[in-house]
Amino acid sequence: MSDLPNLMDGKKIADAMRAEIGDEVALRAKEGRQPGLAVILVGDDPASNIYVGTKEKACQAAGILSFVERMPADIDQQTLLNKVREINEDDRFHGLLVQSPLPKHLDEEEVVRAIDPRKDVDGFHPFNLGLLALNQPRFVACTPLGVMEMLERYNVDPSGKHAVVLGRSHIVGTPMALLLQRKAKGANATVTICHSRTQDIASYTRQADILVAAIGQANFVKEEMVKDGAVVIDVGINRVEDATKKKGYRIVGDVDFAAVQPKASLITPVPGGVGRMTIALLLKNTLLAEELIHNSK
Ligand code: NDP
């Protein structure tokens, strides 16, 4: 697949970014500075465990101080909030995130609000989402930020284009739409957001010069829903049963890749596309957090 001429190779870009980040960390080390990222992981969800382990390794590889606070699944809200506040005050850590999803009995929104917005490297705090809405972005959610980085590195200028975003979550769809429509270089698209209540989604997707799918529905975007020459960004990560695989499943995106790829001018694969970018952008946000805190001293 990697030899397809219209493939946007997330692994290649993420590897390049991680090398650049490693160089930047080395430069700061000469001034006695070390960016640090703390992650709070509640419970033992296997997928969350894997994500957190990957984040930890990526930090270590880049020279970023990494710390994971593991808390039991039956922790109460107050104990978790106290831990967040303790890390807010810990100068070694410039970035702090609480791995989602949290067990059902916990109030995730309250936990996110407790994170110091200056350390909110996930960009989920209302303060940072508000700054983005005001076109003063500081910390922006890593996945949509990764999409913007891919567009830039593949010389896709959204200016004046019609971008259609499928999905309106606070983690992906909403910040994605806000980033694309910003009055700023590398943005300036006209944006349409579609969601589960949108009627006749195909009538919108067919108009898209840039189509971003982030709905969590396997192979939802079919060939006839895509305009010739569109740039197709697939954020979706979905498990589908596959008896030929050892695990019994494989990962596919929200786009029917085999059918849509010949029609697209550029397209991201799943896996190996947007997913690869998310952690690289988390490292970049951690560097930004360290820089902002350093400059405010
Ligand atoms: P959410 O479940 O929070 O949001 C899904 C959004 O899609 C909602 O806005 C929902 O609409 C909309 N939606 C769901 N079904 C349909 C449908 N049939 N037609 C139209 N709209 C629909 O998911 P996330 O935003 O967190 O994630 C989206 C996908 O991206 C998932 O597959 C997830 O695994 C993946 N992901 C990938 C990441 C990466 O690193 N590559 C990181 C984060 C997520 P409504 O608002 O009306 O409910």
Image: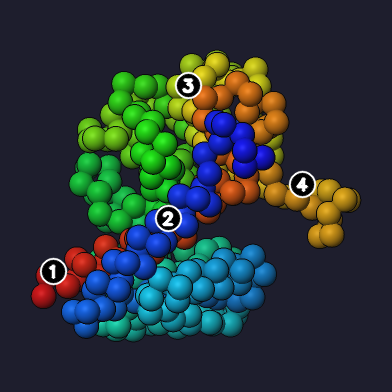
Which residue is identified by label 3? Answer: 208
Q: CA distance from mark 3 to mark 4?
A: 27 Å
Q: Which quadrant of the structure image shows residue 289?
A: bottom left
Picture layout, residue 296 above or below residue 129: below
Q: Earlier in the sequence, mark 3 or mark 4?
A: 3
What element does badge 1 sit on?
helix
Q: Please give left or right for residue 288 compared with residue 217 in the image.
A: left
Picture layout, residue 57 above or below residue 20: below
| Amino acid type assigned to the residue bearing label 1 in the image | Asn
Q: Nearer the viewer, residue 265 or 5?
A: 5
Which residue is identified by label 1? Answer: 295
Which residue is identified by label 2? Answer: 16
What element does badge 2 sit on?
helix
Which residue is identified by label 4? Answer: 240
Q: Nearer the viewer, mark 2 or mark 3?
A: 2
Q: Earlier in the sequence, mark 2 or mark 1?
A: 2
Q: Residue 21 at x, y = what percent?
A: 35, 63
Q: Earlier in the sequence, mark 4 or mark 2?
A: 2
Can you see residue 181?
no
| Amino acid type assigned to the residue bearing label 4 in the image | Val
Q: CA distance from mark 4 to mark 2?
A: 31 Å
Q: Residue 66 at x, y = what percent?
A: 42, 78
Q: Earlier in the sequence, mark 1 or mark 4?
A: 4
Neighbor class of circle 2 (other Cα within 10 Å; few <14, some 14-19, many 20+) is few
Q: Nearer the viewer, mark 1 or mark 4?
A: 1
Q: Nearer the viewer, residue 125 or 189?
A: 189
Q: Please give left or right for residue 60 compared with residue 218 in the image.
A: left
